[in-house]
């Protein structure tokens, strides 16, 4: 009887650990082929037929349509540089530069629904052609509910948010060099109480 109990307990523990790790891999984006740069993560092979099963499951769950291999790459961020979850009631500043690319876009999504967040001016993203840069090519983008001077991206009513940067026609998409990728920093400036 003890042996039967040990076998049953082992099966239960194995199932919980297996399902838990699969959930983390799919829901939290902890895939085998993830490329990380600060708070940002990307899956360079997500648009290819031979992507790993966890990446495929994550895409099936979210309904995202990845960029085809070589056409571009998408980076996402769900936390700031301190590891805190991104919240719509906070003000964030993205600072730095994007990797070498012909064109890029930054959009803000409702992390829980996966949808764009409705806002009063119906602006859902900002791109490399409309950004105001410093003389050295770097920039600051403020993401907040209230209007700000300079590069500002509005956020409507939501709880958790995520940032998506899509880089089009970039050498990164070919998979040649992921080691020295630098993405903009994400700093929380303030939050509403």
Image: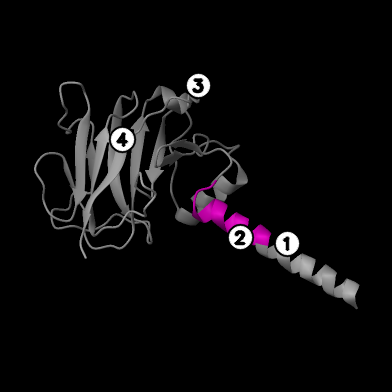
Q: Earlier in the sequence, mark 2 or mark 1?
A: 1
Q: In the rendered image, which quarter is residue 146 located in?
A: bottom left
Q: In the rendered image, which quarter is residue 49 located in?
A: top right
Query: Which residue is at the front of the view, 57 or 8?
Result: 8
Alpha carbon distance from label 2 to label 3 = 33 Å
Is-magenta flag for residue 179? no
Circle 3 sits on which residue? Answer: 176
Circle 1 sits on which residue? Answer: 14
Alpha carbon distance from label 2 to label 1 = 10 Å
Relative vertical location of residue 143 with respect to residue 35 in this rendering, above or below: below
Numbered circle sitting on residue 29: none
* Quadrant that contains the C terminus: bottom left
Q: Earlier in the sequence, mark 1 or mark 4?
A: 1
Eye-nearest disc, 2 or 3: 2
Circle 4 sits on which residue? Answer: 184
Q: Secondary structure at mark 4?
A: loop
């Amino acid at each position: 009887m003890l042996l039967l109990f040990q076998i049953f307990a082992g099966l239960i523990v194995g199932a919980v650990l297996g399902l838990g790790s699969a959930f983390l891999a799919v829901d939290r984006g902890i895939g085998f082929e993830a490329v990380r740069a600060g708070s940002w993560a990307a899956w360079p092979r997500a648009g290819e037929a031979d992507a790993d099963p966890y990446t495929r499951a994550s895409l099936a769950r979210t309904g995202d349509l990845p960029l085809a291999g070589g056409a571009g790459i998408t980076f996402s961020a769900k936390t700031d540089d301190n590891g805190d979850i991104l919240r719509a009631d906070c003000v964030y500043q993205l600072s730095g530069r994007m990797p070498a690319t012909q064109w890029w876009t930054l959009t803000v999504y409702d992390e829980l629904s996966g949808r764009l967040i409705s806002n009063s001016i119906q602006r859902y993203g900002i791109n490399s052609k409309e950004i105001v840069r410093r003389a050295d090519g770097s920039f600051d983008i403020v993401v907040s509910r209230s209007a700000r001077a300079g590069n500002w991206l509005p956020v409507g009513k939501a709880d958790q948010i995520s940032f998506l940067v899509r880089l089009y026609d970039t050498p990164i998409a070919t998979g040649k060099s992921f080691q020295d990728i630098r993405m903009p920093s994400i700093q929380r400036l303030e939050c509403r109480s």
